[in-house]
Every structure is written in structure tokens, then in C-alpha cells.
Image (cartoon, helix red, strand yellow):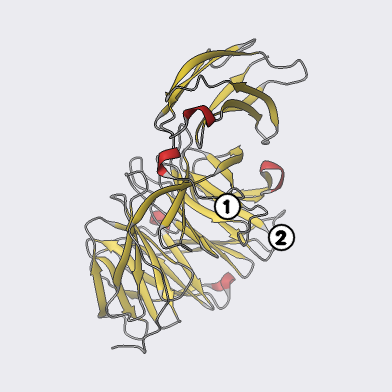
Amino acid sequence: MRFSAIFLIFISAAFAADSLNTRLASVMDISPLRGIDFNDDDGVIYAFAKSPKLYSISHLGGGIILDSISWSGSTIPSGTDVAGRWISVSGGYAYLADWNRGLHIIDVSNPSDLRDVGSVSLSGQPRSVYPVGGSLYVSSNAAGVHLIDISDPESAVAIGTYDIGGTALDAAIWANRTMFVAEDPTGLSAWDLASPSDPLGWLSISGTAGGVEFCGSESLLALTDLDGAVNLVDIAAPSAPTIIDTHRPGGGSLFRTAFSNYLLLVAAGENGLWIYDLRCEESDSGFYIPDVCNIVDVVTTGEFSTSGDVACAADADGRIWFVDLSDFIDYIDEADRPSDIALSIYPNPFNSTIKILLSGGVGASDARSVQVGVEIFDITGRLVADLPITNCGSPQFVPTPLIWQPERSLGSGIYLVRAKIGNSEITKRIVYLK
């Protein structure tokens, strides 16, 4: 079956190595996470922990927990990848894919008083939930995609299953008529929602497709895979999805994506958070890569604008990274991008002073103009120290030891050391034990 084609005017080009700025706003320590969602209705972040546990969080002030709730659900076995849309918030309820327990539902109408609604038992290992009106689509690995009636969320009931023949990791619904499923080993399959037995078509990719998200239009998908590629897929003809562009942000597994206005954000696991600007003839990119991370999901707190917005990235190792996107204004040539940089800090933890050693090549056309410096933030994102370094003017930055002794007013806790050479940066956590 074919639907009438809906064509998207899209400027397609191969990946360009240009970069845009990104910077850390703050970081919040929390339980290891499966996924994250932002509710436009109440302006609250909802983070789904592996334990399982749900947090309601205000993104203001570097992240403030409003409430949390636990239940006797399932944890994820060690070594299992966390690809999938684990949480979706809609109509005052959070829908959670609860691995081998099925579907779990939490009433979030009052973010400061979360209420457990209960579970729906489902076969397989649910790892993705996608609500559309009174229906919910739950991707459940080898068990396919379950269809759940959520017209009354407190009495949700399973009403059918799409047997996709592979491993379903994520799904997205097009125009209430077609379901696109990210799966292994096919890649991307398309299904007529009126016929749960036969696919309309499919798109083969080399890796295991782990995430699928609409990308600015109902006729363009961002399809991520666990082998390190994000494919932009034209689905104007659902029976014949076509890849029109591919990016490989840093290599390694890719998980969820988010899109708003003209920016595509990619949760790139241990390679951090990558952002693509799709306005241009060449897809410029920016990135924020914490020293240690496993970013598996990302949301934004509203429409992007040059006046500033925040991306909230969920870390499977137990953090939420709040990344400021307000610097996405000027393009930077590859010639001006620094090469690898390294940051050494000793001792850590510390109780008096630390020694900071920054090294790396600037790789710039005019090394004398490259800015080099070290900044230290507290856990709320407040700048507590600024340690500028004078560049010697050579293409290879000469390591310069820095000594930092916290002011007496600073208390014990976690601090962030951010070092920059030109437009490249690296951030490490330190622990101050007073």
C-alpha cells in the first residue's frame, strides 16, 4: 500500500568537519539512567533510572529534584545496551518501558507528588514507548511491538501485537497511519497500522538500528544505529524509505536523538553529545564530550534560539549533563579546530590544593590568536575560579602547570574543571574534601 507522497524540501550534503561551540551549563549527579523526557505542559524533566525509579526535575538552577518514586520493576541486566525510547510523557502521565515486567505508568500531573498507577504485563523486553492519542506503541525486542489502549491510562490494556520478525528497539508513528520500527537485523521497517501482519517496506542498514525520531517534519526521520551512524531518512513514500544523508559523530554506539527548529542532537554514548545544524548546505556540527560519560538520551527545554537554550543529556553512568546551546551562532573552519588536548589533575580527591596540567596541539592557522584557559565550576554551574594561560604562539601548546587552592568560602563537594584550547575543551570532575 502506498500513501500520497509528502515531499520535504531539504538541503542534503555529506558530513562537513566544521564545528560549532557547545559548553557545559551544569551537571547533576543522579542514579544511572535509562532515559529522559521533557514535558512542555509543566516545564519539568522526567528521568527514568535503571533501578527502576522516576525523578521529576526542574532544569533551573542546575537541576533540582522535585520528587521521585520507585516500584518493584525490573533492572537492566549488566552489559545490555540501553538503546530505545524508555520514557515518554504525555497527558499528565509518564509511560515507562520496564524491561521484562512490561509497561509501567506514573501519574505526573503534580510533579511534586508523583503517583504510581500500575503496570501492564507484556511479553518480551520492552524498551521503547511511543504514545499517540489514546494509543501507546511499546517496542519489546523479539516480541515485536505491542499496541496498548491508554484512552484511560489508569486502566490501560494490551489489545494487539505487531510481529515484526526481528528485534524491535524503537518506533515512531507517521500521520497516525504508518509505524516505523528501528530493528535488528533489518534496519528500518514500515508498517501500515491497519494491518499488523505485513510490512509496507524496509530499509537495510549495516548496523543495528537503535533509535528513530522525526526530524523537523513528518517526512524525515533520524535513524541511529549501534555501529556509530545517524542516517537522515526520507519517508515521503513510506513503502520506500531512502537515506539522504549520513553522519558519524565520533564513532561508537549511538542512541537517542532530539530535534527542534534546525538543530539535530545525538546521544553518542561514550562520545558525548553531538549537535548538527541542518540549515546549511553543509551540516555543521558541535559536540560536548565529558571526560567520562555514557550519554543514552537527550531532550531540550524548548525551542532553540540564539538567546540561549539547554539540552539535557541522560547519562547511563549516573548524571544529567545540562549543555548550553546559545553559542551556536558562528561557524568555525576546520583549520581553526584544535587537535587532541589532555588534562591531568593531581591529587583527586584533594583537601588543600591541586595541580592542573593542560597539554595539546592547537592546529590553527594563527596559533598566536588561540585562547587557552582553565575554569572551575561548582556543581550548580557557578564559576568559582578562572585561570587564564598565555599561549606561547607555537602550533603546539606548551604544558604549563597550574596550582589551584579553593577560597575559604568554598565547601566540600564536587567541582568541575573545564580546560579550553581554542574551540576545543575537556571537562573533569574533582572532589574537594575540606
**Nearer mark to the viewer, of 2 and 1:** 1
Residue that appears at 60% across and 39% down = 28
Residue 234 lies left or right of residue 43; in this view the side is left
Residue that badge 2 annotates: 110
Residue that appears at 33% across and 79% down = 238
Mark 2, residues whose alpha carbon is within 10 Å: few (<14), some, or many (≥20)? some
Instruction: Judge whether 297 appears above or below 385 on screen.
Output: below
Where is residue 124 drawn, in percent x and y? 33, 61
Where is residue 260 drawn, in percent x and y? 54, 63
| 47, 63: nearer the viewer | 63
Where is residue 137 drawn, in percent x and y? 43, 71
Residue that appears at 63% across and 60% down = 302
Instruction: Judge whether 159 appears above or below 228 on screen.
Output: below
Residue that badge 1 annotates: 329
Q: CA distance from mark 2 to mark 1?
A: 37 Å
Q: Along the polypeptide, which appears first: circle 2 or circle 1?
A: 2
Q: Does any portion of residue 97 appear in the rendered image? A: no
Under tag 1, what secondary structure? loop
Which mark, residue 391?
Answer: none
